[in-house]
Amino acid sequence: MSESYFYAMSVNNACANERLLGACATLDQAEFEAPRSGFFPSIKLTLNHILTVDWFYIDALENGGLGRSVYDPEVPCATLPALREAQRASDLRLLEFCRGAAPRAEVELARPDGVMQRDRADRVLAHLFAHQIHHRGQVHAMLCGTRCAPPQLDEFLLAGDAPLRRAELRSLQLRETEIWRE
């Protein structure tokens, strides 16, 4: 896979997070924290999990050296506004990394058992994007039990979807012409 693919996926990731968190912003704190069906049993816990896992993998991709300390605390954002700000900052870091990604570069990942796993950046990025999609889907399903309509989250990659992603790109200060760089 090429660098342009990973950059496009990082734009997709940032836009989907922007849209999902924008929808969640209509929830009050009680709805944000309410118990729900899911691996992480609330919208708050699921979104915080997405964020901390992002921090872990982005730090590893950047060779930042933080390792598993990014999970302390496990739930760093108590409110949606704080989480939204932190997620946007994380997404912008990932966009910047993918803008100049070296897909075959070696990445070291500190596993829970203390072992340092080595893998290629392209595989780490593919895993990170799959992780994001998986858990955003869980939040999407949780929103079905709230007064907030779950937003459309898969309108970011096709050329014909350009008008549908315009608001998120503008919010992220990105241009359509930046997405697919051949």
Image: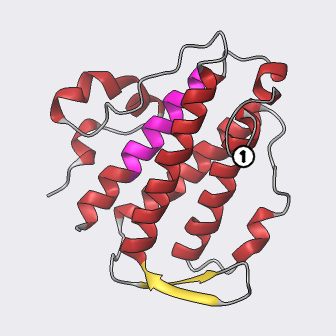
Please give the name of the residue rendered at 35% of the width and 68% of the height, measured from the top-left corner. Answer: 100
Residue 20 falls left or right of residue 26: left
Specify the color scheme.
secondary structure
Q: Residue furthest front?
A: 37
Residue 31 falls left or right of residue 104: right
Q: Amino acid at mark 1?
A: Asn
Q: Is residue 60 part of the magenta span, yes or no?
A: no
Please give the name of the residue rendered at 46% of the width and 71% of the height, measured from the top-left corner. Answer: 124
Instruction: Work out which quarter of the rendered image holds the N terminus and state it.
Output: bottom left
Q: Nearer the viewer, residue 87 or 34?
A: 34
List the residue tagged with mark 1: 48
Q: Percent position (x, y) of residue 175?
A: 30, 38
Instruction: Work out which quarter of the rendered image holds the C terminus and state it.
Output: bottom left
Q: Is residue 20 part of the magenta span, yes or no?
A: yes
Circle 1 Cα neighbour tier, 10 Å, few/some/many (<14 / 14–19 / ≥20): many
* Residue 34 in the image: above or below residue 115: above
Q: Percent position (x, y) of residue 76?
A: 81, 50
Which picture quadrant has residue 53?
A: bottom right
How many numbered marks does the figure carry? Answer: 1
Q: Which residues are magenta?
A: 10-23
Query: Is the stretch drawn in magenta largely helix, strand or loop?
Result: helix
